[in-house]
Amino acid sequence: MSDSPVVERVGTAVYTVPTDAPEADGTLAWDSTTLVVATVGCGSVTGLGYTYAPAAAARVVDDLLADLVIGSPALDVPRANEAMRRAVRNAGLPGVAAQAISAVDIALWDCKARLLDLPLVRLLGTVRDEVPVYGSGGFTTYDDDRLERQLRGWVEDEGVPRVKIKIAESWGRREERDRRRVARARAVIGDSAELYVDANGGYGAKQAVRVGRGLADDGVTWFEEPVSSDHLSTLAAIRDQVPQEVAAGEYGYTLPYFAHLLAAGAVDCLQADVTRCGGITVWLRAAALAEAHGIGISGRCAPHAHAHAAATVPNLRHLEWFHDHVRIERTLFDGALSAPGGTLTPGADGAPGLGLALAPERARPYRVA
């Protein structure tokens, strides 16, 4: 390795993986998930990053970011992040451009750690050895049997002590089914496991308050996006009226968004997605913002992209062990983690970087670009 290695190449690939069953939440239905991989290279070392985003994110990397990153100092990741953010000013930062930047930023951190032959968690500096997770799925399309199998798999087979299901089916128009499914989930997992719900912004304001108060009888302690997180004052008002902790932030694409969410007093726990918010560079800043407000942070989805960074922040609550993304990451990558007892131990095997490597033979059938 030279004293000042520079990025020599940037590449992308797009993979679309069908779901293992029809899936839906309160406001959206889907039957496949697309993952955009970004790679950066310095000599024989290649760093890997990714985002769950449409294939257009790969075009942003190829057309707007690659030439900017090539030739930049490989060890100065925040410098490259700032340059990428400025480069998409006219294209529009929130949304697909932020997801593209996130994938490249994660790849740059992975590359830096590999150049230094360190697990990323050791490069960043740990606060904790174990990172707690919660099982996440419970889609509104599941029947009772499938819901029960998934919940028992987490709680009984893997020992995960906290789980989350989707509610607000059909934009809140099936409230009685929501309540029945939550009661069913509680009966399946017993009294010792924590039970969370996610409405994906599907309820109206007063409906969210009514539902939240009703779910207290089933011991629900986490109410994610009871209404759209676009409406911060409404979210804050609901937070004051329900017994559950209110969480939101997964659609934050910029650091100021998180600052506004926290300033509004809208959440008890901030969510941020490392594959959307600008990568590890910005995710760590969001965690610091939350800590300054006395608020915890939870990593949304993409557990392997979050795991190393999550172990470095003192106010971490947990990561989302999301059914789709766990399945996809185990399929496409070697080096995927397991969560016995509901915790991850990133870097424990000593593998450099994120510890992930694309599995070409397994990934090839899903590649679309």
Image (cartoon, helix red, strand yellow):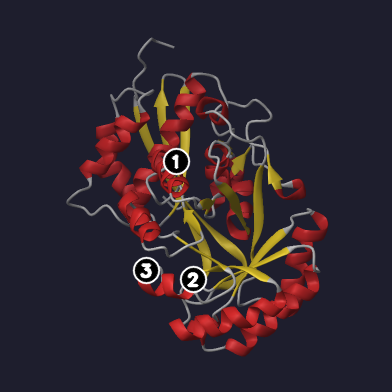
| Residue where numbered disc 2 is placed | 239
Q: Residue furthest left?
A: 90
> Compared with residue 199, is residue 367 higher up or lower down, i.e. above or below?
above
Q: Nearer the viewer, mark 2 or mark 1?
A: 2
The front one of 79 and 244 is 244
Horizontal and vertical percent for residue 187?
79, 75
> Compared with residue 136, is residue 339 higher up or lower down, i.e. above or below?
above
Assign a secondary structure to mark 3.
helix
Q: Amino acid at mark 2?
A: Arg
Q: Nearer the viewer, mark 3 or mark 2?
A: 2
Q: Amino acid at mark 3?
A: Leu
The front one of 148 and 364 is 148
Q: Determine contact: label 1, label 3, CB under 8 Å.
A: no
At label 3, counting other C-alpha atoms closer than 10 Å, the crowd grade (few under 14, some 14-19, many 20 or more) is many
The front one of 272 and 142 is 272
Q: Determine contact: label 3, label 2, CB under 8 Å.
A: no
Instruction: Give the CA separation, mark 3 to mark 2.
Output: 10 Å
Q: Does residue 28 show up?
A: no
Horizontal and vertical percent for residue 282?
39, 43
Q: Amino acid at mark 1?
A: Leu
Instruction: Give the CA separation, mark 1 to mark 3.
Output: 22 Å
| Residue where numbered disc 3 is placed | 232
Horizontal and vertical percent for residue 182?
68, 77
Give the quarter of the figure containing the N terminus: top left
Q: How many numbered discs, if any?
A: 3
The tag earlier along the polypeptide, 3 or 2, is 3
Q: Determine contact: label 2, label 1, CB under 8 Å.
A: no
Horizontal and vertical percent for residue 250?
45, 59
Label at residue 284: 1
Assign a secondary structure to mark 2.
helix
At label 2, counting other C-alpha atoms closer than 10 Å, the crowd grade (few under 14, some 14-19, many 20 or more) is many
Instruction: Give the CA separation, mark 2 to mark 1.
Output: 25 Å
